[in-house]
Image (cartoon, grey):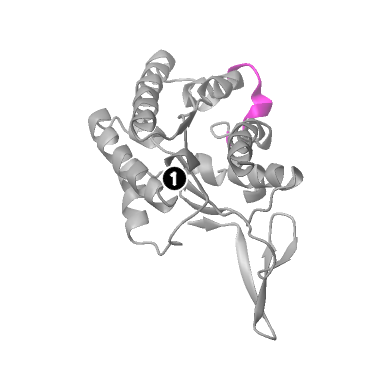
Amino acid sequence: MSNCHRWHRLPQNFSVKICVICGEKRCNMSKHHYTYLALGDSYTIGEAVPIHDSFPCQTIQLLRKAGHHFQAPEIIAQTGWKSFELAEHILHTRLNETYDFVTLLIGVNNQYNNLSIDEFKTDLEFLLRKAVHLSGEKAGHVIVLSIPDWGVTPYAAKKDIKKISSEVDAFNSICESVAKQFQTIFINITEESRKAKKDHTLLASDQLHYSRKEYAVWAEKVAGAIAGLANK
């Protein structure tokens, strides 16, 4: 698990949250600050880039710049995690009772390891059920992101690119249908990720994961959805 914030205890029985994204200090006794939980895998932690370049952290940066008050994101994700591994970790992690917003991006490692798409659907239903519960049963505050197409990256150069893209599309069909089933928001970032085929500045140094530039596109989509809800 990667967490973007640390607590520092100060005298006189109050604490200040210091965000490692921007160093901003806020007293807990001030107005309500929204909370955001990001669930996923390497694409959520921002593998091969600094944590502040990940899409959850860039999302918070954008929302703060727009005048919204947000705590640093809590990120539960790990490189290589499949859907059932994320589910298992959530079951054994102490979380807040509720979060104002939750995002979920998972499934690429199921596809990469040729795992059953039917079992992925079952896992995803569990994960979304849990995400909705963590949102305080506000399904409209849960966002599912589609799986990026790693088949366009140099890492996949010697693999069957068409097969990868086809399978990613199949998994994303499940993501979208389950998101609708639970009445959550679905954001398609797959087509954006495919632009990396011609623009390698969208890729991180490992030539498999994405750069700050690409994560910024995802963050804009997520921040846009959250801002619309936060304004209500």
Quadrant containing the C terminus is top right
Residue 190 image point, x, y percent:
51, 23
Q: Residue at x 42, y 18 (%)?
A: 165
To which residue does mark 1 refer? 138
Locate residue 32 relative to residue 84 in the image: left or right: right
Q: Residue at x 53, y 56 (%)?
A: 2
Residue 9 image point, x, y percent:
64, 79
Q: Nearer the viewer, residue 226 or 79?
A: 226
Looking at the image, which residue sits at the far top? Answer: 162
| SS class, disc 1 | loop
* 79 vs 150: above or below: below
Instruction: Examine the image and state in which quarter residue 113 appears.
Output: top left
Residue 221 image point, x, y percent:
61, 31
Q: Which contiguous range is marked in magenta?
A: 197-206
Instruction: Examine the image and state in which quarter residue 47 appears.
Output: top right
Question: What amino acid is found at the position of numbered circle 1 in the picture?
Answer: Lys
| Residue 205 appears in the figure | no
Looking at the image, which residue sits at the far bottom? Answer: 12
Residue 149 lies in the magenta stretch: no
Are there few (<14), some (14-19), or many (20+) residues within 10 Å of tag 1? some
* 218 vs 31: above or below: above
Q: Nearer the viewer, residue 219 or 34?
A: 34
Q: Nearer the viewer, residue 201 or 7?
A: 7
- Main SS class of the magenta portion in the image: loop
Residue 204 lies in the magenta stretch: yes
Locate residue 129 relative to residue 42 in the image: left or right: left
Residue 100 image point, x, y percent:
52, 51
* 156 vs 130: above or below: above
Q: How many marks?
A: 1
Q: Residue at x 46, y 47 (%)?
A: 39
